[in-house]
Each structure stands twice: as structure tokens, then as C-alpha cells.
Amino acid sequence: MPEEVPRLYASYYTHRTSGEAGGRTPRDLLYGVYRALHSVVAQIVGLAEEMRLLHQAGLGDMQPGRLLDVGCGDGGFLDHMRRKGWTAEGSEVDASAAGIARRRGLTVHLGDLTALDLPSSVYDAITLRHVLEHLPDPRPVFETARRLLRPGGRLVIVTPNIQSLGHQRFGRAWRGLEPPRHFCLYHPDLLRRLAERAGYIVRTCVSSAAHADVILGASLTLQAVAGKPVPDPPPVSILRTVRAVMLQCREHRRIRKGEPCGEECFLVAEKPL
């Protein structure tokens, strides 16, 4: 039932921010060290550019304009883009996550994108990062985003890839499945067809290993607990982290050989002029 959906997100990661917890925790500091080391590995194996592209949500080559991030969560990405010069606002169905974002001074519209009374043809870019899989039917969102975008405006979607190396390897333990929150899962060809049928011009639609270390690390945890509840957040495991990065590097090599096996689909499309 629709009224039950918020209960699925009562303990979701979008409800947590380091700042609200009273400063950076030892776990935050450890994660910072990991990201620094991981960036060095990424440079060595040639993954750094792919990571940079997704970190910028496919908007790095655009002049800052008006951005709408659908499913903005606690507003971390919006805050990042605001610092890059964008006029950034979000939409969010979860009131708790929206409240965290608003306390950052961000503009967040509460409610389903298709039901919000937003002006047409005003946004230079609309992003949906790990949102599409949470929707039972993606078509209304494609149509609404097209109405909201100005001519030539950009739609960016990131979503789990059902054809990923992680899904092939971990099966039911793959983090991308995430029942019962994920309704639909996609692969690049399907995502491209959906965008084209909705009237967009597709600039790129590929699979990516940019965040594979996170997804594969979580999958290793799910595989290890074999269906038992996972602590939130899960315990830190150096061995699990190393294994996840090794799998990420293997996945990246296979992508470069032409296999669509990245953990995420990455779509960049435009509204026709």
C-alpha cells in the first residue's frame, strides 16, 4: 500500500549525517583515509576519470544553472553542486530526509515528483541518482522531467545494473536487489530505450564501475551473513574492503573490453531543442 512506503525508509541512510551527529566520528575519519587510498588505486588502474564523471553526475562540462535533484535525500549532493555554483533544489518523498536537507539551507520540495506543482521548461539539469529502481513505473517520471527541463536541458540517471558482475557473482546477496525497496532493475539497453521512447536524445548510456567498491563490499557482507540481519552500519572489515576493490578493478577491466558489467547504469540524455 502507498501509505506503507515511508516505513521502508525509517532507518535509511538518508536519515544520517555526520554533522547532525555532533561532528566527525572515528568511522568517518577511517572512511576518509580509505577514500584517499582508493583514489590512488583508481589513478593507477585508470578508473579515476570514470569516478570523476559520476561524482559530477555527468554535469561537469556544463555551465552551472538551475538543477533539480530528484530523491535528494539528506541533500549532500545538492550541497556539493551548490558549492560548484549551481542553483540547486531537490525533491524528496521522505519527510525526515527532506528535513535534514532543509536544515542545510537547501530548497527541497516534499512529495512525489509527478504530483509537485513545479514550473515547466526552467531546469537546466535534472538528476535521479538511485531513484528509478524505487519506482513501480518509471515512465511518468521520464515524462515529468521532460516537461520541467528547458529545451536542451539534461537528464542524468544512475541506477543499479542487473547485468553487473556483482549480480552475476553474488546472486540473491547482490546489494543492488535490495528488497523490498527496489521495485524495478535495469540494464543500459533498457534504460536507453526508455529515454528514447520518452522523447529524449541519449548522449551516453553505459555501465560503470565508479562506485562498485561500495556495492560489492555490501554484497560481500550480505553473502557472509547468509540472510541474517546486517548491523546498520555494518562493521568495518579491511579484508572485505580489499576484496571489494579487487573486484572493482576486475570489473573495470571487463568494461574496457566492452562488457556492460558495471554495477551501475549511467544515462545522460537531453530534451530536444
Image: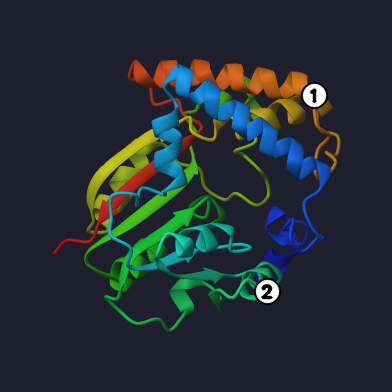
* Amino acid at the residue labelled 1: Ala
Mark 2 secondary-structure assignment: helix
What kind of colouring is applied to the model shown? rainbow
Q: Is residue 165 visible?
A: no
The residue labelled by disc 2 is 99
- Residue 71 in picture, x, y percent from top left: 54, 62
Which residue shows up at 36% across the image and 41% down it?
190
- Residue 110 in picture, x, y percent from top left: 57, 77
* Amino acid at the residue labelled 2: Gly
Mark 1 secondary-structure assignment: helix
Q: Is residue 58 left or right of residue 76?
A: left
Work out whether residue 251 or residue 43 is closer to the camera in this orientation and state it: 43
Work out whether residue 176 or residue 232 is closer to the camera in this orientation and state it: 232
Query: For residue 234, what is the image quadrant?
Result: top right
Which residue shows up at 53% across the image and 57% down it?
77
Label 1 environment density (alpha carbons within 10 Å; few <14, some 14–19, many ≥20): few
Q: Is residue 59 left or right of residue 37?
A: left
- Residue 193 in picture, x, y percent from top left: 29, 45
